[in-house]
Structures are given as C-alpha cells and as structure tokens.
Amino acid sequence: MRGKAITVITAACAILLTASAMAQVTKVPGLSIKIGDEVSAVKAALHTNIEPEPLENSLPVGFGINPNAGKTILHLRSKGISVFFKKEIVESVKFDAPFADSIAGIKLGDSEKALRSVFGKPLKTPTVFGTNQSFLYVLDDAAYIRFDLNETDGVQTIYIQK
C-alpha cells in the first residue's frame, strides 16, 4: 500500500512540475492572464461567461489532419482579446483592435521606434508578410512576445506564445 501511495504522490508531483515548466513565468504588465492558465481562471480574469469555441481546421477538407483538433478559442471581440487553449490550458494570447491597454509597455499603434526603445533588437530579422513585419522577443524562459506592425499604422497585433 505504501508503494502505491508513493507512486501516486510521485506522479502528482511530476504533473505539477511539468505544468509549471510549460507556464509563462513572467507576469506581464497590463496582462491579467498568462500561458498555462486554465479556462476558469481566464474567464474570471477577463470577467466573461463566454465559453471557448472549437478552433476551426486550418487545412482544406480531405487532408485527414486537423492541426487544431482539441484546441479552442475564447474571442472577446469587443475587447480585442483572443485566448487560444489546448486541452483547456492557455497556449497563446492575441491582442488586436479595439484593445487599448499597454502590454509590456507597448500599445497598438506604437511605432517601430517605440517598440525598439522598449524591447531593443528582435531575436531575428523581422519576418515580412504583406505590408506587415513580425518582431519576435523573448518574454521569459517559457514564452515569447511577438509584435506585428506596419510602417503606416504601427503595431497591429501583439501575441504572447510558447
């Protein structure tokens, strides 16, 4: 009996350590949720009763693979916040218009100059897609923060992701 109890305690500790190792470590100024939070904690922090919805398949029908299987999204359109879950655990967070608060010192609409003054040089040369550029920075040992911006309108979206 003692052996079973030790096995159960060891398994529980391993699960807790694994979950915390995957969680975002750094508290981001302006953000009340983080990578690794559960759905209930996110809903409470964002003051919503809306339930996450299944994330649609991003591949055409017939491929037989759905990379979004088991993933859900809580999209608060009026707040400009989208929270992406995998197995009811936050995997990433996206901020876009009309989100008006600052995240880690940057707001939507801020220029590249403002972004670089707060975060410095990005991890790699910004990725160009269409008229936007994507600037990636390390947030902490478990998460990245990405800013998508264009020259005309500044930062358009902010992502916090694994």
Image: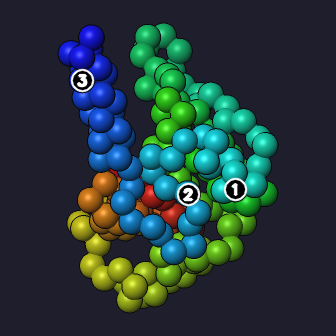
> How is the model colour-coded?
rainbow
Q: Quadrant of the N terminus?
A: top left
Q: Could you tell which of marks 1 and 3 lies nearer the N-terminus? A: 3
Q: Is residue 131 above or below residue 69?
A: below
Q: Is residue 60 above or below residue 131?
A: above
Q: Secondary structure at mark 3?
A: helix
* Front one among 9 and 66: 9
Q: Is residue 84 above or below residue 9?
A: below
- The answer to the question of whether label 1 and label 2 lie on touching residues, with beta carbons closer than 8 A, is yes
- The answer to the question of whether label 1 and label 3 lie on touching residues, with beta carbons closer than 8 A, is no
User: 10 Å neighbourhood of mark 3: few (<14), some, or many (≥20)?
Assistant: few
> What amino acid type should be assigned to the residue bearing mark 3?
Ile
Q: Quadrant of residue 10?
A: top left
Nearer the camera: disc 3 or disc 2: 3
- The answer to the question of whether label 3 and label 2 lie on touching residues, with beta carbons closer than 8 A, is no
Report which residue position mark 3 lands on. 6
Nearer the camera: disc 1 or disc 3: 3
Note whether residue 134 is visible: no
Q: Is residue 76 left or right of residue 68?
A: right
Residue 114, percent from left and from top:
46, 87
Report which residue position mark 1 lands on. 46
